[in-house]
């Protein structure tokens, strides 16, 4: 699963990440950014300590809904 973000989208996600206190939302943002960098679903799930299915869902939902994290 690969997500391709523009530089503007990456910058917006990083800015949003800095403003959020909710750990789950922060992990969602990190997962999207890591997918863009080419990390695999398995690698991301290990890095963020979340289920692979969660990463897959995040990827799918982001692809469908854009900025909805």
Image (spheres, rainbow, N blue to C red):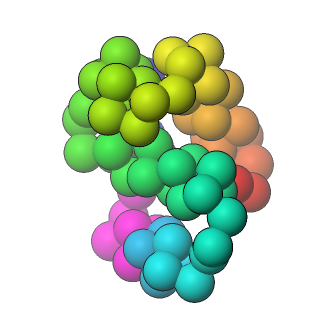
**Residue at position x 51%, y 72% in the image:** 17
Q: Which quarter of the figure is the C terminus placed in?
A: bottom right
Query: Which one is nearer the viewer's eye here, 31 or 9?
Result: 31
Q: Is residue 56 visible?
A: no
Query: Is residue 44 found left or right of 24 in the rendered image?
Result: left
Is the magenta region chiefly helix, strand or loop?
helix
Query: What segment carries the magenta color?
Result: 5-11
**Residue at position x 34%, y 24% in the image:** 46
**Residue at position x 44%, y 30% in the image:** 49
Query: Which one is nearer the viewer's eye here, 16 or 23?
Result: 23
**Residue at position x 24%, y 45% in the image:** 37
Q: Residue furthest left?
A: 38
Q: Position of residue 1 (x, y in %)?
A: 43, 23
Q: Position of residue 62 (x, y in %)?
A: 64, 44
Q: Position of residue 44 (x, y in %)?
A: 36, 30
Question: Magenta span has 9?
Answer: yes
Query: Is residue 10 found left or right of 40 in the rendered image?
Result: right
Q: Position of residue 6 (x, y in %)?
A: 38, 64
Query: Which one is nearer the viewer's eye here, 22 or 33?
Result: 22
The image quarter in which residue 41 lies: top left
Q: Does 69 sit above or below residue 56? A: below
Q: Does 17 sit above or below residue 61? A: below
């Amino acid at each position: 699963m690969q997500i391709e973000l523009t530089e503007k989208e990456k910058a917006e996600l990083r800015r949003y990440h800095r403003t959020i206190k909710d750990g789950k939302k922060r992990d969602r943002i990190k997962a999207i950014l890591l997918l863009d960098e080419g990390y695999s679903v398995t690698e991301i799930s290990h890095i963020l300590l979340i289920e692979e299915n969660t990463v897959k869902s995040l990827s799918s939902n982001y692809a469908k809904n854009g900025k909805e994290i």
